[in-house]
C-alpha cells in the first residue's frame, strides 16, 4: 500500500495504491468513509492494482476550493494520478461511490474496462438531494436545517412512527443530523458533490454501446440501497451485468464479507482487462 498526494489547483488530493497486479481499477468510497475502506478488498484481489481516491471532505484530502466538484474536475484529478493517466481502467464504487462511478463513466471516454458496484447509490434518482442542492429554495432549506435541525428531527420521528421511514434509514439519518459536526459535514459533502446525479437511461445506453461488463453486489437486508434497484438495472443491460446478493446489510466491505465480494469480482474480468492493457 502506497499513500500519495497530487496537487489540484489549491487542494491536495490524497489517494492510496493497493497491489501491483495487471488489472488497473479506480475506487470511490462511501459517504463519510475514506480510501482505507478498500484495504481488505485489495488484499483479496491480488491480480488488481487499486487506486482509491479520497473525495473532498473525506480522509486526508485537503479541499481548498469552493463547495463544488464538477465531473470534469474529477476526471482531471483521475488523469493527474500518474498510476492512471490515460490508461484503460475499471471502476469500483461503494455506496455513495457508486453514484460517483456511474457519473464519471461516460466522461472517461471509452477507457473503462469494467464497472464493479458494491451496494451502490445512484441507481435511483434522489429527489431530496436534487431539491437540497440544485434549487434556491432547497439550498436555503438545507442550510437552515443544518443550522437548526429540530423541526427535521421531529418530522423524521413522525415518519418513523408512521412507517414511512424504516428503522435502518432512521438510524442512518439520525447519526448524521443529530450532532453539529456531522451536520456541517453533510452540508459540505452534499453541496460539493451536487453534480454527481447519474442519468441511468443514458448510462444504460452507454454501457450497451461500449459493451462494458458490470458486476454488482448487494446485501439482502440493505434498506439504504436495496438489491431490487440492482436487479432492475441488470435487466436493462442485455446480459452485460451480473448480480450477487449476500445475506447481510449495507456494510459489504466489512472483512467478513470481503472474500465473497472479491471472489465474485475476480473470476470474470481478468482476461477482459489483460486484453485491454
Image (cartoon, rainbow, N blue to C red):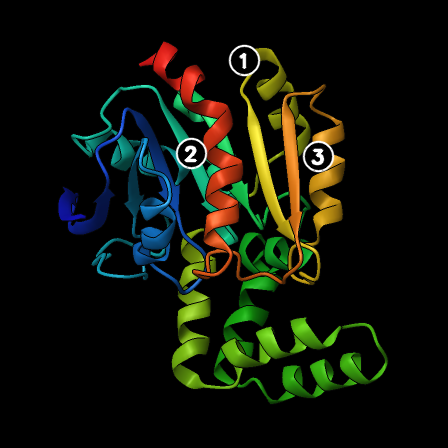
Decide: marks 3, 2 in contact (CB < 8 A)? Answer: no
Answer with mark 3 or mark 2, whichever residue precedes in sequence.
Answer: 2
**Which residue is under mark 1?**
210
Q: Residue at x 25, y 43 (%)?
A: 18
Residue lying farthest right?
162
Whether residue 195 is visible, yes or no, is no
Q: Is residue 22 left or right of residue 143?
A: left
Task: Return the mark for residue 91.
Answer: 2
Task: Return the mark for residue 74.
Answer: none
Answer with mark 2 or mark 1, whichever residue precedes in sequence.
Answer: 2
Answer with mark 3 or mark 1, whichever residue precedes in sequence.
Answer: 1
| Residue 203 coordinates in the image, percent (x, y) | 60, 27
Quick one: SS at disc 1?
Answer: helix
Instruction: Judge by depth and name the residue closer to the eye, 184 or 256.
Output: 256
| Residue 72 coordinates in the image, percent (x, y) | 36, 32
Q: Residue at x 70, y 81 (%)?
A: 156
Q: Is residue 211 left or right of residue 227?
A: left
Q: Is residue 77 left or right of residue 203?
A: left
| Residue 56 coordinates in the image, percent (x, y) | 32, 55
C-alpha distance separating marks 2 and 1: 15 Å
Q: Is residue 59 above or below residue 95?
A: below
**Which residue is under mark 3?**
233
Please tell me how crowded label 3 is: few (under 14), some (14-19), or many (20+) other residues with Cα within 10 Å.
some
Decide: marks 2, 1 in contact (CB < 8 A)? Answer: no
Amino acid at each position: 500500500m502506497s499513500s500519495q498526494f497530487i496537487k489540484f489547483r489549491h487542494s491536495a488530493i490524497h489517494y492510496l495504491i493497493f497491489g501491483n497486479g495487471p488489472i488497473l481499477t479506480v475506487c470511490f468510497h462511501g459517504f463519510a468513509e475514506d480510501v482505507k475502506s478498500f484495504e481488505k478488498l485489495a488484499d483479496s484481489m491480488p491480480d488488481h492494482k487499486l487506486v482509491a481516491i479520497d473525495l473532498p471532505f473525506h480522509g486526508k484530502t485537503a479541499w481548498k476550493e469552493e463547495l463544488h466538484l464538477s465531473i470534469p474536475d474529477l476526471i482531471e484529478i483521475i488523469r493527474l494520478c500518474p498510476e492512471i493517466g490515460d490508461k484503460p481502467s475499471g471502476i469500483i464504487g461503494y455506496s455513495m461511490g457508486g453514484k460517483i462511478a456511474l457519473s464519471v463513466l461516460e466522461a472517461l471516454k471509452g477507457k473503462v474496462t469494467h464497472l464493479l458496484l458494491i451496494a451502490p447509490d445512484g441507481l435511483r434518482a434522489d429527489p431530496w438531494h436534487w431539491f437540497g442542492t440544485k434549487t434556491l429554495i432547497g439550498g436555503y432549506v438545507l442550510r437552515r436545517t443544518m443550522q437548526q435541525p429540530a423541526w427535521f428531527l421531529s418530522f423524521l420521528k413522525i415518519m418513523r412512527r408512521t412507517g414511512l421511514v424504516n428503522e435502518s434509514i432512521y438510524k442512518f439519518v439520525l447519526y448524521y443530523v443529530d450532532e453539529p459536526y456531522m451536520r456541517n459535514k453533510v452540508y459540505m459533502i452534499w453541496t460539493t458533490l451536487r453534480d454527481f446525479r447519474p442519468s441511468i437511461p443514458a448510462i444504460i445506453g452507454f454501457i450497451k454501446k461500449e459493451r462494458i461488463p458490470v458486476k454488482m453486489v448487494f446485501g439482502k437486508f440493505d434498506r439504504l440501497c436495496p438489491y431490487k434497484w440492482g436487479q432492475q438495472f441488470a435487466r436493462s443491460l442485455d446480459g452485460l451485468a451480473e448480480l450477487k446478493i449476500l445475506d447481510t446489510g449495507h456494510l459489504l466491505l466489512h472483512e467478513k464479507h470481503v472474500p465473497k465480494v472479491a471472489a465474485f469480482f475476480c473470476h470474470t474480468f481478468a482476461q477482459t482487462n489483460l486484453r485491454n492493457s
